[in-house]
């Protein structure tokens, strides 16, 4: 079993490579992602959707935080330079809160925590394809 810190570092490295299969492999089968843009979704369809919306990802790790005591949570804090399919570069800082299955290194919940207002103001919702004008 990996330590929680190792799981978070694996996640950030895989996200930077756009290696969504590795990311999905970090989740328990019932793993859920909770996103400010997409709401609550099972991990695999969420990362499929992210892959479809993305051209490249550059991840700059800032820190990893581990909960005290017997809790099963950890946070990855990083800068995300996200180039979407239309070529737009969106840069933001994010804290991803991981909740792990008991006595496991598998993620059951991933809460994405970031300010969506600047992104929506300048770029709109990049998960949705543009419709006819």
Image: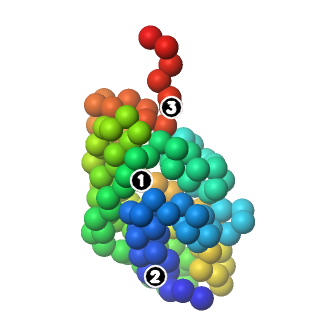
Single out the mark in the foreground, 1 or 3: 3
Vertical placement of 75 versus 82: above or below?
Answer: below
Q: Earlier in the sequence, mark 3 or mark 2?
A: 2
Label 3 – label 2 distance at C-alpha:
33 Å
Q: Considering depth in this image, is 70 or 114 the residue closer to the camera?
A: 114
Give the percent coordinates (x, y) of residue 41. 63, 49
Q: Which residue is label 3 attached to?
A: 128
Q: Is residue 8 above or below residue 50?
A: below
Please state which of residues 15 and 39 is positioned toward the viewer in this rendering.
Answer: 15
- Badge 1 crowding class, 10 Å Cα cut-off, few under 14, some 14 to 19, many 20 or more, is some
The residue located at (38%, 75%) in the rendering is 65
Tell me the element at label 1.
Answer: strand
Between 129 and 103, the one nearer to me in the picture: 129
Query: Which of labels 2 and 1 is toward the front?
Result: 2
From the image, which quarter does the N terminus lie in? bottom right
Q: Which residue is mark 1?
A: 113
Residue at 45%, 59% (x, y): give it. 18
- In the image, which is nearer the foreground, mark 3 or mark 2? 3
Q: Position of residue 58 (x, y in %)?
A: 32, 58
Considering the numbered disc 2 on the image, is that residue within a helix, a strand or a loop? helix
Name which of mark 2 and mark 1 comes first in the sequence: 2
Crowding around mark 3 (Cα neighbors within 10 Å: few <14, some 14 to 19, many 20+) is: few
Do we see residue 67 in this rendering? no
Q: CA distance from mark 1 to mark 3?
A: 20 Å
The quarter in which the C terminus is drawn is top left
Alpha carbon distance from label 2 to label 1? 20 Å
Instruction: Mark yes or no: residue 126 visible.
Output: yes
Q: Residue at x 33, y 32 (%)?
A: 123
Task: Say the numbered circle drawn on residue 6.
Answer: 2
């Amino acid at each position: 079993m990996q330590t929680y810190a190792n799981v978070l570092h694996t996640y950030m490295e895989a996200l930077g490579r756009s290696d969504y299969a590795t990311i999905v492999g970090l989740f328990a089968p019932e793993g859920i992602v909770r996103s400010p843009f997409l709401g609550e979704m099972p991990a695999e369809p969420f990362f499929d959707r992210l892959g479809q919306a993305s051209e490249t990802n550059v991840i700059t790790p800032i820190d990893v935080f581990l909960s005290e005591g017997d809790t099963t949570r950890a946070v990855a804090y990083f800068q995300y330079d996200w180039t979407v399919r239309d070529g737009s570069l969106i840069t933001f800082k994010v804290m991803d809160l991981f909740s792990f299955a008991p006595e496991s290194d598998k993620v059951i919940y991933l809460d994405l925590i970031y300010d969506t207002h600047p992104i929506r103001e300048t770029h709109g919702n990049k998960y949705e394809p543009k419709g006819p004008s």
